[in-house]
Image: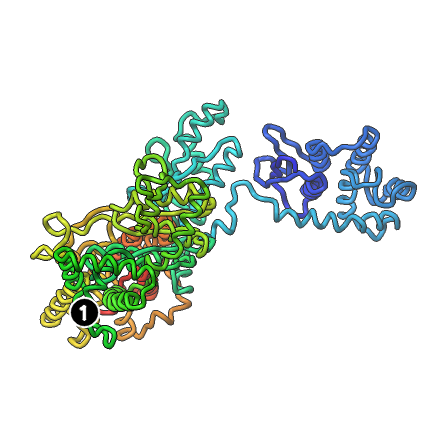
Amino acid sequence: MAESLLLVNAKENCADTLKALWASKLFGVALKADTSDVPTAALVYGDILVQDGNAMAQALQLYARASSGHMDNMLVEDWCEWEKTSMSEKSLTKLSNALESSSPLHVVGSTTTIADICIVVKLSTMDASSFPLSVQKYLEAHCPAMEEAKDSLKDVPVVGEVSEEDMNNPSAQHVVKAIFTSTLKKLFGDNVELPQQNWVARCSKPKDGDYQCTAAMSIFAALKKSGSLPDGMQKPQDVAQAIIKTVGGSNPVLMDLAVVGPGFVVCRLTPSFLEKGIHKLLNEGKLPKPSITPYTCVVDFSSPNIAKEMHVGHLRSTIIGESVCRILEFVGHKVHRVNHVGDWGTQFGMLIQYLKEEYPEFSKSMPNITDLTVFYKNAKQRFDDSPEFKKTSQLNVVKLQSGDEECHKIWTILCDVSRKEFQKVYDRLDVTVKECGESFYNSRIPGAIEEFEKAKLISDEEGGAKCVFVGKPFAIPLMLQKSDGGYGYDSTDIAALKYRLHTLKAKRIICITDYSQENHFKMCFKAANLIGWLDENQSLEHIGFGTVQGEDGKRFKTRSGDTVRLVDLLDEAVHRMKESLLERIKEKKTSITEESVPEVAEAIGYSAVKYFDLSRNPKSNYKFSYDQMLDTKGNTAVYLLFAYARLESIMAKAKADHNIDVVELKDEKVVLGHASERNLALHLQQFTDVIETTLEDLFPYHICEFVYNLSVAASDFVTQCHVLGSPEMKSRLLLCKATTLAMREAFDLVGIRHVQRI
């Protein structure tokens, strides 16, 4: 296919346009449509301009180098000249004689030429009833090809035109970028390369605009370097001004375009574009999702140890993991929610022995282990103090791994008791996770090691340990098998990776643990790459989170120095919220009843703990503070829920006092007249972009930031704009409704329970 040409000023029912379209199809030359100051249809290639239909057809033939022999060329040119200067309804005898004496379908040779194109197009404008029979048949034979060429005008891509698909993309930033991309292509064609990334972004200062395009500087530099700067462009600001002029003043998406600084083009989204987004949200009842290709993900999170209580150290992995799963599922991915519990290892020898001694009736009734932490500590104490107990415990490990029935039964009891305790936390936090612990992979470890041996990646170290050196920057190896033949974390995690990649066929695997395990996972990931388990479309990721600290900046513990049980931490937040709600009822600051206090306190208390964590970068440490997380002001779940409840209250009053049910306002239009209305609509429009950003690093704080900024904008809106009883009441109620829909969607993604009243 030849390189494309520009067809400018193309019009329907234009003979010159039709000749060019037909010739482009005949010779396989791609065209792009554009406009020009030239008064008629024309072909443009660089500085070359070709007008007149016959000349355009001939130019396309030459361009495609599709000419036949010299004699045919001369005859074709003669017929084209005859069509242009002499052809009329009264002078068709020459044409008729030629068709009858040679080919009935072509005036030259046996295939269609530009002579046929020019003659047939002109014949189509005449009264065919007076044509000689041979000419009528000639016209009829070529009509299908001519009509096909005529219809092709609508398919010719327009230079600088944004596709319908791009314009309907749910991402506002995508739409803005598409407009600037097409503008730059229209201005400079393929002479310049666009920047690789981030050249269209949100303005850092809202007073400057909604979005900014920074391409002018790099394009100016590229044009200057190549010596192809257009006349009048002496600096980057001139390129920016050309961009603004080309976008124009009546763009359906962009307005208020201006040049800032060294050549930034800033702009705002038009009210009509924002209003369209609000109506789409209201009609569909949910926020738009990014368009993605679904695939399988594994999210490994929470992962407590059997026979131990979940403590504050498990908080971050559990709630970050749940939110990551919700985000991935929201856009359409299949997610395996994996709880990689510590249910295997040498510690079970002492736990089995301690349970046998403390609960000798275990085979008849379930042991009443009320505190797993105490149970574990006592077992460890016996293990340290009694050589006989220690020796028996070590034998229990061998028996358990060999399938001993009694040891396996006790192990099962310990797992069941632990699961019940874990579930108390998961129920409070609305977490769903499927257990697939270390024991699941135990039988799969030998096969994984065998693969490394066959690949000659195993190094037999002193004592017989089987290790894998993964290379820089790691000097120490992964130990896939200990010198005594046992397995450790490295063995289990390598087997788990193979299972997830090959059996679950996960394209994206995310492991969520504290930051101290970062190098361990990097080494496992490098080993999986070395052995060739990954294809180019699979990715392995580790989200390492920081420490939950006390007011002293050290790890959060009880006053006695013990680790804080997660259940106790969550319940304390609920207790404090109950006290606050009861005080509000006493002071008549709320319409909720005392009967509803427990439910509302749970919703807010648990949400407050989660949001306090999720609203910050997971890599950072933070100081745990009930006072801060339960504050009604600032970036807290309590503030968000108050903002949400305020909007719900406005809509409820509209129905009660004004007999207006916002659900029934389907035919009403949202009109963004006030600055705070537009600001709120702009924040609603950002959701898809926020989700796309979040899908890159899977940090939930992006969504927390979105819903907080949305709540601030909503609070400003209802403060600045009177809703109930105003002339704009219906429009503003719809804006309230759209905002609550968006807030609920965001709440769900980070696990906040929404409440109607506080």
Extreme right residue here? 101
How many callouts does the rendering have?
1
Residue beneath the point at 52% across and 31% down: 191
Q: Judge by depth and name the residue closer to the eye, 530 or 9.
A: 530
Residue beneath the point at 37% across and 45% down: 525
Q: With respect to residue 533, does 564 lie above or below?
A: below
Label 1 neighbour load within 10 Å: few <14, some 14-19, many 20+: some
Q: In this view, does 547 lie to the left or right of 281?
A: left
Res 527 visible: yes
Q: With respect to residue 291, does 58 lie above or below?
A: above
Q: Judge by depth and name the residue closer to the eye, 639 or 460.
A: 460
**Could you say which quadrant of the image residue 444 lies in?**
bottom left
Colouring scheme, one of rainbow, by chain, secondary structure, one colour: rainbow
Res 589 visible: no
- The residue labelled by disc 1 is 369
- How far across and how far down the image is residue 327, in percent? 36, 56
Q: Judge by depth and name the residue closer to the eye, 339 or 134.
A: 339
- How far across and how far down the image is residue 422, in percent? 25, 65
Q: Name the image quarter holding the N terminus.
A: top right
- How far across and how far down the image is residue 631, in percent? 15, 58
- Element carrying mark 1: loop
Q: What residue type is labelled 1?
A: Ile
Extreme left residue here? 560
Q: In this view, does 294 lie to the left or right of 570?
A: right
- How far across and how far down the image is residue 541, in percent? 36, 47
Q: Judge by depth and name the residue closer to the eye, 338 or 307.
A: 307
**Could you say which quadrant of the image residue 177 lies in?**
top left
**Could you say which quadrant of the image residue 215 lies in?**
top left
Q: Name the image quarter holding the C terminus.
A: bottom left
Residue beneath the point at 25% across and 59% down: 395
